[in-house]
Image (tube, helix red, strand yellow):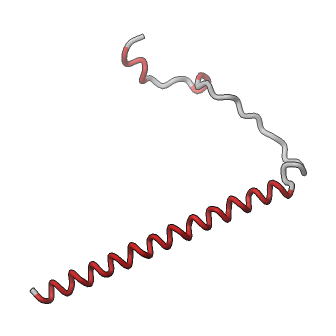
Amino acid sequence: MGFWDRFKRKPKDDLGLPEIKPTAITAETTGSENVRAKMDLVLTQIESMNIRMETLGQRLERLERMVQEIWTIAKQG
């Protein structure tokens, strides 16, 4: 095996990943526990987005203050 052989692409069949078998949708997989888990995930994502928006708002306020200070300095000079 040469040095450059390490960087060659492996065939897709030889990736060593387990085969994914499709599952049928049943009443069991769409039960209330599954719905609750999905809702918890969505709520967590919304909370994360709210935190990001707050952070962006704080950054924007700082930028606005910096621009105002630069404008004031430029007017004086």
Residue at (60%, 67%) from the top-left corner? 47
Residue at (81%, 40%) from the top-left corner? 23
Percent x, y of residue 75: 15, 89
Residue found farthest to the left: 77
Please, is residue 2 above or below residue 70 in the view? above
The reply, left or right, for residue 6 in relation to residue 68 is right
Residue found farthest to the top: 1
Percent x, y of residue 3: 37, 16
Of residues 77 and 1, the one nearer the viewer is: 77
Residue at (53%, 68%) from the top-left corner? 51
Q: Quadrant of the C terminus?
A: bottom left
Of residues 9 and 66, the one nearer the viewer is: 66
Residue at (26%, 84%) from the top-left corner? 68
The reply, left or right, for residue 19 in relation to residue 63 is right
Counting labels gives 0
Residue found farthest to the right: 27
Please, is residue 25 above or below residue 74 in the view? above
Q: Quadrant of the N terminus?
A: top left
Percent x, y of residue 32: 85, 58
Splitting the image into 4 quarters, where does residue 38 fall? bottom right
Of residues 38 and 62, the one nearer the viewer is: 62
Please, is residue 61 above or below residue 52 in the view? below
Percent x, y of residue 41: 68, 59
